[in-house]
Image (tube, grey):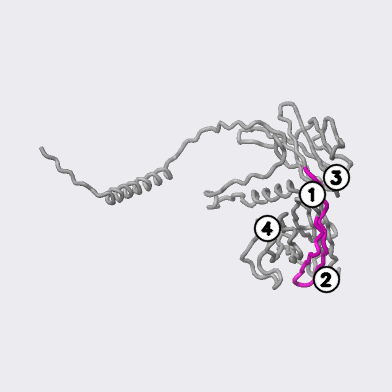
Amino acid sequence: MIYSYKCLSHSKIDSLMKKYLFIFSVYLFLYSCSADYDIGQSNLLEQNRLVVNSLLNPTKPISVYFYATERVDTGYVFAAVKDVKVLLKEDEKILFDGICSDTVLQLDYHPKVGSNYAIEVSSPGFETVSASTIITDSISCKAEMIIDEDQLVELSEFNLPANSQASLWITSYAVFEDGIMQYQEMYANNLLIDKVNQISGMPVRNPTVGSLYYDAFLRIKNNNLSNLDKLIFTPVQAIYGSQPEFDPKNPKPYDPWGGQTQISVKLITASREYDQYCRTLYLQKSMIIYDNDISAIVYQPIQVYSNVKNGMGIFAGLNETNYYFDLPNE
């Protein structure tokens, strides 16, 4: 018996192989998408760790909070811990060395500008943790505000700390007699502002600041600070509440500001630790998945920055400068 063979050219062979590989790939993709996998119980056994949280601000006494991670059926929880051994140093000076019998270490002592701070915390059953940070000079500037329908805040003539790795965070607040409320929208048009919290697609607020606003804060990273000569923004609060109706039996003067007496602007001089912690914390919170959110299929978790070695939390320095603008009575 004679068998005849039909020889195929290399181009035809490549074409057939590509065709069948494509069909197989599509089949495999569809099959894998429809399959149900039983992953089973996780074998991840991360050891419990100490958590240290402290933001060192020269305007406030030192407070350090202590927690620990605890494994439960659904994962891990944070629980306050006490009776931890703490060594806290300012440069080479010991501020505290002993057992903290409470869940928070509070000292009647304010951090000093220019000093380095280091902490070491230990407790039986946990690995010893440590962290360090620095308090830099505060960034200041010339601050002016035009009180009209535009509410333009102009910051200029910035005084920057020498040889600093600090970044600048700016927040603003509506000040009332019984408290403050942070402005959630800060309209600005400046290329030096970090776009991490930029929101677009809004109507033009005014010709100066345009239609872009930033969610709750303006961040100018360290690399851009030397180029910052002027920054203009408009703080906006979406809802203040309604103006009370006029009562002829108990007449009161009309208050166009709804009880607000001032607008305040806070310049936060952020150490590298504070800057990275707040930025990554914002990114994580802005990625929270809500029910029926289709974007959950591509969700990528954001790891919040921590400078606590062998543990978790944040031990960071910052400084601040505040400006207040009185509002007119009429």
The extreme left residue here reads 1
Q: Is residue 208 magenta?
A: no
Residue at x 84% of width, y 40% of height? 91
**Disc marking residue 227:** none
Residues under labels 4 and 3: Cα distance? 29 Å
Quarter of the figure that contains the C terminus? bottom right
Position of 264 relative to 210 (above/below): above
Query: Percent from the top left, x then y, of residue 151?
Result: 77, 69
Q: Secondary structure at mark 1?
A: strand
Mark 1 — residue? 318
Q: Please provide the residue range marked out in magenta.
A: 133-160
**Disc marking residue 111:** 3
Mark 4 — residue? 194
Q: Secondary structure at mark 4?
A: loop
Q: Is residue 155 magenta?
A: yes
Mark 2 — residue? 254
Query: Percent from the top left, x then y, of residue 117?
Result: 81, 41
Please name the amino acid that badge 2 sits on.
Answer: Tyr
Q: Are marks 2 and 1 in contact (CB under 8 Å)?
A: no
